[in-house]
Image: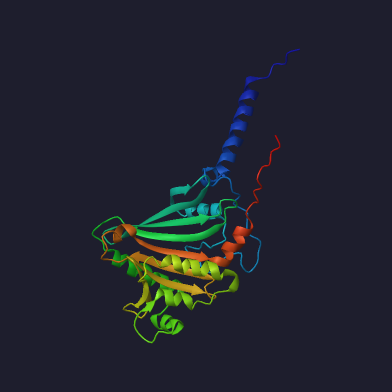
């Protein structure tokens, strides 16, 4: 027996299903369907403990935060998705904010490095560049430094660096400064490696800037340094020497790491056992 279904009923049913599908699509955030991020769960968090989140932040994002949730938050604030990158599985996402600056436009590009297996942020960098070649990078550096000091306090002073390294006056060789570091025992190797990576030239040294802060000179790179809890967290503000040919293209970069949280994130990686076949 063939039952006839009124066309009006079929139309109403179709529209109801279509409407529910659209409602579901509206609930899904664009970044939740973006290749490189959609494999993560935005609600996943590190277990709560002392080393589950950094105390310092950049734009209210912390080391140990969920990368997808953080990227969604930036996107909802008006950031433009710049790039998602990595090797076989992406491990970083960049989003950009734009604002007028002098007679040009300033781009703040936030890069979130995250663990490939679980999506927790391991490092945050904020790069500032200006579109116009007529705006000096020194102006940008001074403005970012002023803002950083207002938020994080003063960076390492030259007097503190001299006192730690046992230098009476003048510049402080970076290799000598590294030898006097006293980080937590469990992260000592990571801290030392971090400073060794900053030593891009054998003559790297901490010099006195015009405000009494220690400014790291290493090749063309110039960096201010903040640290908390015996180098548990390190924040750097780096740029090339303003006289360098590509200083404007390099921009000014604010970068945050937290070694204790990084170790906790690494400990949560999925264990990938090798497949053993008997043929």
> Can residue 107 be seen in the rendering of this structure?
yes
Residue 15: image location, x then y, percent: 59, 30
Q: Which percent across, then down, holds residue 209?
A: 33, 77
Question: Coloring scheme of the render?
Answer: rainbow
Residue farthest along the front direction in this orientation: 279
Residue 155 appearing in the image: no
In this orientation, which residue lies closer to the viewer: 4 or 168?
A: 168
Q: Residue furthest top?
A: 1
Q: Please, which residue is most extreme toward the bottom here? A: 168
Q: Is residue 16 above or below residue 117?
A: above
Q: Is residue 184 above or below residue 168?
A: above
Answer with left or right where residue 31 lies relative to residue 238: right
Q: Is residue 204 above or below residue 4?
A: below
Residue visible at 50% across and 65% down in the picture: 257
User: Which quadrant is the N terminus positioned in?
Assistant: top right
Q: Residue 4 location in percent, x, y?
A: 69, 16
Residue at 50 percent of width and 60 percent of height: 123
Task: Name the foreground residue: 6 vs 145.
Answer: 145
Q: Residue at x 55, y 52 (%)?
A: 68
Who is closer to the viewer here, 185 or 215?
185
Residue nearest the observer in this picture, 27 or 118:
118
Query: For the view shown, which residue lies furthest in the left direction?
Result: 134
> In the image, is 65 to the left or to the right of 135?
right
């Amino acid at each position: 027996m063939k039952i006839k279904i009124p066309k009006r009923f079929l139309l109403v049913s179709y529209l109801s299903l279509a409407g529910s599908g659209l409602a579901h699509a509206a609930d899904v955030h664009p970044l939740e369907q973006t290749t490189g991020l959609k494999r993560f769960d935005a609600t996943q968090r590190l277990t709560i403990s002392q080393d589950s989140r950094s105390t310092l932040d950049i734009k209210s994002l912390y080391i140990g935060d969920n990368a997808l949730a953080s990227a969604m938050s930036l996107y909802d604030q008006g950031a433009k998705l710049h790039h998602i990158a990595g090797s076989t599985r992406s491990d970083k996402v960049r989003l950009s904010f734009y604002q007028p600056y002098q007679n040009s436009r300033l781009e703040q590009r936030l890069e979130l490095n995250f663990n490939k297996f679980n999506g927790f942020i391991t490092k945050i960098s904020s790069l500032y560049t200006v579109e116009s070649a007529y705006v000096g990078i020194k102006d940008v550096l001074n403005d970012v430094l002023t803002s950083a000091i207002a938020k994080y306090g003063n960076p390492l002073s030259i007097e503190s660096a001299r006192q730690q390294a046992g230098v009476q006056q003048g510049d402080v060789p970076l290799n000598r400064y590294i030898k006097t570091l006293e980080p937590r025992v469990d992260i000592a190797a990571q801290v030392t490696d971090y400073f060794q990576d900053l030593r891009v030239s054998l003559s790297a040294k901490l010099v006195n800037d015009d405000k009494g802060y220690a400014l790291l000179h290493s090749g063309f790179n110039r960096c201010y340094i903040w640290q908390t809890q015996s180098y548990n967290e390190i924040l750097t503000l780096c740029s090339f020497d303003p006289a360098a040919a590509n200083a404007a293209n390099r921009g000014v970069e604010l970068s945050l790491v937290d070694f204790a949280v990084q170790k906790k994130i690494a400990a949560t990686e999925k264990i990938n056992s090798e497949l053993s076949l008997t043929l």
